[in-house]
Structure formats: structure tokens, C-alpha cells
Amino acid sequence: MAQNIYDQPTFFEGYSKLPRSVEGLDGATEWPAMRALLPPLAGLDIADLGCGYGWFCRFAAGEGARSVLGIDLSERMLDRARAEGVSASMRYERGDLDRLELPAAAFDLVYSSLALHYVEDAGRLLAEIHRSLKPGGRLVFSTEHPIYMAPSRPGFTSDGEGRRIWPLDRYLVEGPRTTDWLADGVIKHHRTLGTTLNLLIAAGFRLDHVEEFCPTEAQIAARPELEEERDRPMFLLVAATR
Ligand SMILES: C[S@@+](CC[C@H](N)C(=O)[O-])C[C@H]1O[C@@H](n2cnc3c(N)ncnc32)[C@H](O)[C@@H]1O
């Protein structure tokens, strides 16, 4: 069973204050880049894995998706998603991505935003997603970038001359990483970039786009604190096709 840190009250409370929780998709710096990877959503059958508050599910329903299934491990996240409104084409289910079984050839698009790094066995999940897509169906996901996840102390430091340093270590040591983000003892699962891409290929996907996300010039101009994001990628964005 996965950790389900989002149901922990302190974590849930902290998460609810993040810009992406308050402002939704517009509060997520990487959303424009994710959106650019999506096909037109009208008429599609879609699954959103690790749907959280359901921002993407509501967006997809609004774009005219035929059906949208949001899956998340956290009851609190799902309660909040349901409270925001469930239209006729939408439904939410509780599920653990480490054990999830999906119907075969059921979806045109599987979407997942920032949930894959909580999954221990990504190979199993990617194979399950591949099986659940209709031929030609798409997978679009984001995950924490492995350079962001790998360090034993993931925070900027400074060298003797005042240069900002990202303290990358243990990059080639895959496995769990425990951080104290919003709550103590949050467990994520580090995989190298090569491992993630090879798992996709082994599952049978064709890779369409791989992006080591960097905010745009315009985003950095509007929010100068984003400048430090140029020093290491925080997110990995991938689009693939069955
Ligand atoms: C960073 S949040 C992202 C939420 C949403 N996708 C978004 O981008 O706003 C990660 C979500 O993944 C969910 N999650 C983490 N581990 C999971 C697992 N093993 N199975 C299903 N959902 C999981 C969490 O409960 C949380 O809602």
C-alpha cells in the first residue's frame, strides 16, 4: 500500500495553501506546457491518475470530453474534488496507482500530473496504462524531474563565491527518497531519466515529446523568483502514444 500522505491533516492543510491548490491550473507554472501536449479533448474518454482536487477533470469535461474518470488515493483530495462539482460525464474513484487495474482499451487519453513520483513500480503502472488505452491513444504526464528528486538534501545551497548550487548526489541510486515537504517523512520514488523513458518503451509506447520543464521568459519576467528554476529542472513532461 502506498503512503497516502495527502490524507495526513498537516500535509493536506499545507497543500491547500499552494498556488496550484488555490488558483487551479492557472496556478501551476507547467500547465501551459502540459496543455500544449494534449490533443483536442472533445469526445474523448479520459482517465486522470492522481487527480487531486480534480482541476484537470473539470477542465476536460468543460472541453467536451465524453467521459472523465479521476482516480486518487486520498479521500480528502477526492472529497474536495467532488465538492467542486461533478458533471454527468465525470466520476471519481479511489485507487492506488501501485495496484491499479484499468479496463482494457477504454481510454483515448490517460493524463497524470505530478503523481508518478509517488509510485514505486512505475513499470507495472505504465504497462497497465498502455493496456487501458485504445490503439492510438495518448499518455500525457508530468512527474518530478529525477535531478530534482535524487539529492539526499534537495534544496539550493551556495558555493564559496555566492553561486547557487543544486546539490545533486545519488542520482544513479534509484529508490525511495524521504523528504520533509509540508510534513515530515514524505516518500517519493526516484528513477533516472533513462529508466523512465525505457519503461515507457518497454511498455510499448512511442515517445512523442520529452520536456525538462523550464518556465518561459514571460513567466520569469512576471515572477522573478522563478529564475532559479533555470539551474535545474523541477518537472519532467512526457507525451507518448499507444
Ligand atoms: C501533487 S498532487 C497532484 C494533484 C493533481 N494531479 C494536480 O496536478 O493538481 C499528487 C496527487 O497524487 C495522489 N497520489 C499520490 N500517491 C498516489 C497513489 N499511490 N495512488 C493514487 N494517487 C496517488 C495524491 O493523493 C495527490 O492527490
Image: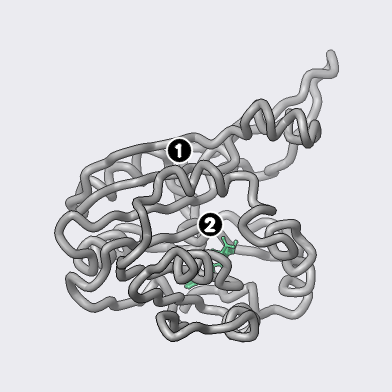
46 or 162, nearer to the observer? 46
Quarter assignment of residue 53: bottom right
In this rendering, would 39 be left or right of 161?
Answer: left
Are the residues at dot 1 and dot 2 in contact (C-beta closer than 8 Å)?
no
Say whether residue 93 is visible.
Answer: no
Disc 1, ligand 1: is the CB inside 8 Å? no
**Label of residue 184 in the image:** none
Residue at 23% across, 64% down: 133
Residue ranking furthest to the top: 161
Q: Which amino acid type corresponds to the residue marked 1 in the rendered image? A: Leu
Quarter assignment of residue 85: bottom right
Q: Is residue 213 above or below residue 11?
A: above
Image position, residue 162 (x, y; %): 85, 18
Say whether residue 156 is visible.
Answer: yes
Residue at 21% across, 44% down: 206
Quarter assignment of residue 60: bottom left
Q: Earlier in the sequence, mark 1 or mark 2?
A: 2
In this rendering, would 86 be left or right of 202?
Answer: right
Q: Is residue 163 above or below residue 129?
A: above
69 or 115, nearer to the observer? 69
Query: Spatial distance from mark 1 to mark 2, Cα to Cα?
Result: 21 Å
Residue occupied by mark 2: 114
Element marked by disc 2: loop
Image position, residue 170 (x, y; %): 54, 39
In this rendering, would 236 be left or right of 138?
Answer: right
Q: Residues within 10 Å of mark 2 (few under 14, many from 20)?
A: some
Image position, residue 11 (x, y; %): 73, 71
Q: Which amino acid type corresponds to the residue marked 2 in the rendered image? A: Leu
Residue occupied by mark 1: 172
In this rendering, would 208 be left or right of 113?
Answer: left
Give the number of callouts. Answer: 2
Disc 2, ligand 1: is the CB inside 8 Å? yes
